[in-house]
Amino acid sequence: MATRKVAKKKPKKPTKSKKEAPKMKMVTVYIMGEAYKVPEEATIMGAIEYAGHQIKRGAGCREGFCGACATVYRLPGDYKIYSGLACTTLVEDGMWLSQLPAIPAHKPVYDIDKLKPDVTTFQKLYPEVFRCIACNTCTKACPQDLEVMDYIQAAIRGDIEQVMDLSFDCLCCGLCAIRCPSEIVQFNIGLLAKRLYGKYLSIKGKQLEKRIKEIKKHKYDKEFKELMKMKKELLKKKYYERDIE
């Protein structure tokens, strides 16, 4: 009987099992009073969106610069109410939080050309600043770690330059104002001081004033029109190749 040799099949090499992705650790947070499971490493803003909410107000740069996402929250077992920016503050298990899409703030209308760069301007426009009790609550609430109370005290003394300097990095998020027992709107006072300093006290640059006059005389209109017509890539190339003094 004729026989046929059957080739033995080579045993398959055991396939390496794919490493399973580590499970995401979740925590419980309460958004507007309702409990949600969200990733442990999420920011408050990320947690709100992970929970399915669409943020229509209270979001801007998402990098801690614009101050649009002021948020207040409490933590379990802690009687204090905390504040921060939703885009930079991480969630904690058991956190109760609520966003503040806008902070009500007194802001008088004024003509900067008719103001004086001294204490009388604060007396007229923001008399409540003189109710400051130096409790430092505003400083503790500031997400930028600014010395808010110090610049309010400088405003009381009429030191425009120091108010401008200490409030320069203010985001106008309003968290200082919502915590102030004297109901002062600190960020608007800082804004006024910066305007007064820029108008009356800052050292004027001769080169800048010259360039402004040239612009007003339409010296650069042709170049502006060319730039407006340029394609994005060419515009970007010219920007990075420009001369920087």
Image (cartoon, helix red, strand yellow):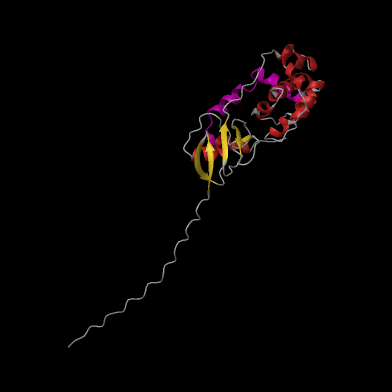
x and y percentages locating residue 84 in the rendered image: 63, 35
Q: Is residue 24 left or right of residue 149?
A: left
The residue lying toward the viewer, choosing from 46 and 243, is 46
* Viewer can see residue 150: yes
The residue lying toward the viewer, choosing from 245 and 93, is 93
Quadrant where the image shows the C terminus = top right
Res 202 → quadrant: top right
x and y percentages locating residue 95 in the rendered image: 58, 40
* Viewer can see residue 202: no
Q: Is residue 133 left or right of residue 42?
A: right
Quadrant where the image shows the N terminus = bottom left
The residue under the point 60% across, 35% down is 73
Name the residue at the top extreme.
114
Name the residue at the bottom extreme.
1
The residue under the point 54% across, 41% down is 29
x and y percentages locating residue 16 in the rendered image: 44, 66
In the rendered image, the vertical position of residue 47 relative to residue 132, given as above or below: below
x and y percentages locating residue 93 in the rendered image: 57, 44
Magenta region includes residue 213 = yes
Q: What's the magenta bit mostly, secondary-structure-wise?
A: helix
The residue lying toward the viewer, choosing from 82 and 231, is 82
Q: How many marks?
A: 0
Magenta region includes residue 43 = no
Res 180 → quadrant: top right
- Which region shows up in magenta? 206-232
